[in-house]
């Protein structure tokens, strides 16, 4: 971020006793092409966007990690793109600090999965650890998939890139990563939920307790303008389209049935709201932005 630019993209709310800060990392203006959704044509995608007053040619995909403060801990859910993404991303650290959370006070980092927009922020531009005092937590099935050297050796040149990226990111700290499984309470107040499909170990999180719980859906859907209305559409980012579709229905059904507040990594900022069933799909009702509530 340039020094003349004002930090922006912070939104604070509560889930029970947990203070949640949604922290914007930025966005990627993705040029839409055939194949972005495996089972919808480009005109179908464009018409769906246009019907919601969104651009036809570009899908602005936003990135919003969470910082959770509870019981003396400061926990991040994912870390943004760091310096590895497009120039329109990489604002997470500046915005986190603008929210009054210094990098060295972060006690824990919980990863939802290992795509680059979620993990690269662990390292700074020099390759050092951005959050020097944080304990790292990752889903065991995600780790087992990507850190399997035999699988990397079998991959094509293009497929190798994410494997190599993850070895750069976790190099030197791999022995310090706590590997959790679904249904574990990873840190107090944060329980991991099976959300496989987007990646083999993709994880959602139930945060807080009682009626004020927050369901962090991570990448169960990408942009709600496309995938709430059409939960069966398979984005090219979903590694296993079948599992991702089943997960999308299950997680959004849970949110709708229990009237749970949700957060989502790729929901438009402040990346939180509610879900209801509508027709054969769902409707996302974004939270109202309030300051000082
Ligand atoms: Zn993502």
Image: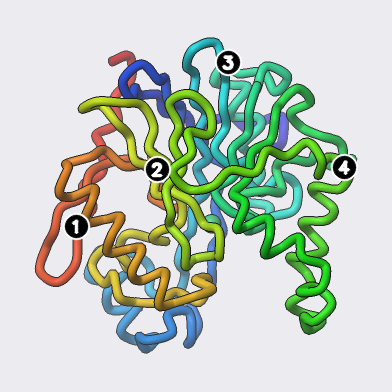
Badge 2: residue crowd in 10 Å (few <14, some 14–19, many ≥20): many
Q: Residue at x 53, y 40 (%)?
A: 65
Q: Earlier in the sequence, mark 1 or mark 4?
A: 4
Of discs 3 and 4, which sits in the foreground?
A: 4
Of discs 2 and 4, which sits in the foreground?
A: 2
Q: Is residue 7 above or below residue 116?
A: above
Q: Earlier in the sequence, mark 2 or mark 4?
A: 4
Q: What number is the disc on residue 254? A: none
Q: Which residue is mark 4?
A: 127
Badge 3: residue crowd in 10 Å (few <14, some 14–19, many ≥20): few
Residue 175, given in percent of the width and then of the height, sits at 82, 40
Q: Is residue 286 left or right of residue 72?
A: left
Q: Is residue 48 left or right of residue 84?
A: left
Quarter of the figure with the N terminus: top right
Q: Please tell me whether mark 3 sits on a helix, a strand or a loop.
A: loop
Circles 3 and 4 in contact, beta carbons < 8 Å: no
Q: Which residue is mark 3?
A: 100
Q: Is residue 113 above or below residue 229?
A: above
Circles 2 and 1 in contact, beta carbons < 8 Å: no
Q: Which residue is mark 1?
A: 283
Q: Earlier in the sequence, mark 1 or mark 3?
A: 3
CA separation, marks 2 and 4?
29 Å
CA separation, marks 1 and 4?
41 Å
């Amino acid at each position: 971020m340039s020094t003349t630019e004002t930090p922006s993209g912070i939104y604070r709310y509560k889930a029970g006793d947990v203070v949640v800060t949604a922290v914007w990392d930025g966005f990627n203006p993705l040029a839409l092409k055939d194949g972005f959704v495996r089972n919808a044509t480009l005109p179908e995608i464009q018409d769906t966007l246009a019907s919601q007053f969104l651009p036809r040619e570009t899908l602005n995909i936003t990135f919003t990690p969470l910082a959770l403060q509870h019981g003396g801990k400061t926990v991040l859910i994912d870390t943004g793109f760091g310096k590895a993404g497009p120039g329109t991303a990489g604002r997470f650290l500046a915005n986190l600090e603008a929210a009054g959370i210094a990098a060295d006070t972060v006690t824990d980092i919980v990863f939802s999965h290992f795509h680059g927009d979620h993990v690269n922020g662990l390292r700074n531009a020099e390759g050092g650890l951005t959050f020097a005092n944080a304990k790292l937590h990752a889903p065991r099935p995600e780790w087992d998939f990507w850190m399997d050297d035999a699988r990397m050796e079998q991959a094509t040149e293009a497929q190798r890139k994410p494997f190599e990226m993850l070895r750069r990111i976790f190099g030197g700290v791999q022995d310090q990563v706590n590997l959790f499984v679904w249904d574990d309470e990873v840190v107090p107040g944060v329980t991991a939920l099976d959300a496989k499909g987007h990646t083999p170990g993709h994880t959602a999180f139930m945060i807080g307790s009682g009626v004020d719980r927050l369901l962090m859906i991570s990448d169960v859907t990408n942009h709600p303008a496309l995938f709430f209305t059409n939960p069966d559409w398979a984005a090219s980012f979903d590694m296993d389209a079948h599992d991702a579709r089943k997960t999308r229905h299950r997680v959004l059904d849970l949110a709708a049935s229990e009237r749970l507040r949700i957060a989502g990594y790729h929901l438009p900022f402040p990346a939180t709201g509610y879900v209801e069933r509508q027709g054969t799909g769902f409707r996302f009702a974004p939270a109202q932005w309030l300051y000082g509530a």
